[in-house]
Structures are given as C-alpha cells and as structure tokens.
Image (cartoon, helix red, strand yellow):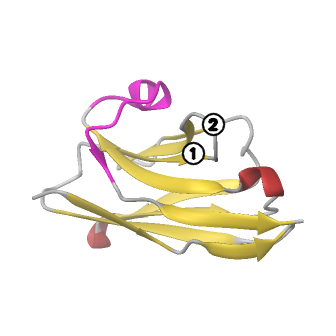
Amino acid sequence: QVQLVESGGGLVQAGGSLRLSCAASGRTFSNYVMGWFRQAPNKEREFVAAIRWSATNAYADSVKGRFTISKDNAKNTVYLQMNSLQPEDTAVYYCAASRGTISTMMSGWGDYWGQGTQVTVSS
C-alpha cells in the first residue's frame, strides 16, 4: 500500500523557515515525480514545487528563490525547505506522487497524496 506521510509543519513568524518532509513507502518511486501542493482556507489547491528522482525540478513563481525541493533517494523522502516565509504562505501543504511528468504535476495531477501538514506564518 502506497503511503505518503508529511511532517515538519508548524507555526513560524514571518521571515522564518521550516522544512517539510514527505516519507514515501509501498513501492519504488524512482520513476515518479514527487511534489508539493498547498491549499489555503477558501482557496483552491495550488502547485508549489516538483522534482524527479533525476533531480530535475520546477517551482511555482510565488515561491521561486525562497523554497527548495530536494530528495533523498535512499530514504525515499522528499523535502521542501521554506525560507523567508510570509503570511500568504499559510496553508495545508500536501505531498504528491505522480507517474506522469513535471508538467502534468504542475497542472495538478497526482496519483498519490499525503494527508497534509499545516503551515502557519504569523505577521
């Protein structure tokens, strides 16, 4: 059974940093695109970042230069380092895995999803 388990969310002041982790299990993810999405209250879920196991990556314009996605193949884990956090980054952050491409993930497609972790940035 495929599982994606996020951790690392919490409350941080504006300008602070957090690192989210997504531990994947249940299959080999070497051919998957892994990514992060977020959903703020009363807003649609939006793409944040994605990475292939080959390390090719992509970011939403709103987080470029502040967020960094990375992976540890040995641990089947994907990370999202978030720096210079702002109140508008407040959302539930979801990990996703896709058998498609980075482009399909950027359009919102994921084959598997985690349960989400809350990130709250206070002003």
Q: Are marks 1 and 2 in contact (CB under 8 Å)?
A: yes
Residue 74: give x, y in percent of width and height: 28, 71
Residue 81: x and y in percent read 62, 65
Give amino acid for label 1. Gln
* Closest to the observer, 59 or 8: 8
Residue most extreme to the right: 123
From mark 1 to mark 2, how far is it between C-alphas? Answer: 6 Å
* Element carrying mark 2: loop
Give neighbour class at mark 2: few <14, some 14-19, many 20+ (Cα, 10 Å): few
From what the image shows, is residue 5 above or below residue 106? below
- At x 57% / y 33%, what residue is drawn? 44
Instruction: Find disc 1 in the rendering and name its residue.
Output: 39
Residue 65, given in percent of the width and then of the height, sits at: 76, 49
Q: Is residue 92 left or right of residue 52?
A: right
Q: Amino acid at mark 2?
A: Lys
In this picture, residue 16 sits left or right of residue 36: right
Answer whether residue 26 is magenta in the image.
Answer: no
Task: Specify whether 5 is left or right of 50.
Answer: left
Q: Residue at x 37, y 47 (%)?
A: 96
Q: Is residue 31 above or below residue 20?
A: above
As for residue 112 lying within the magenta part, the answer is yes
**Helix, strand or loop at disc 1?**
strand
In which quadrant will I find the C terminus? bottom right
Give the magenta part as a residue range: 100-113
Q: On the image, numbered disc 2 is attached to which residue?
A: 43
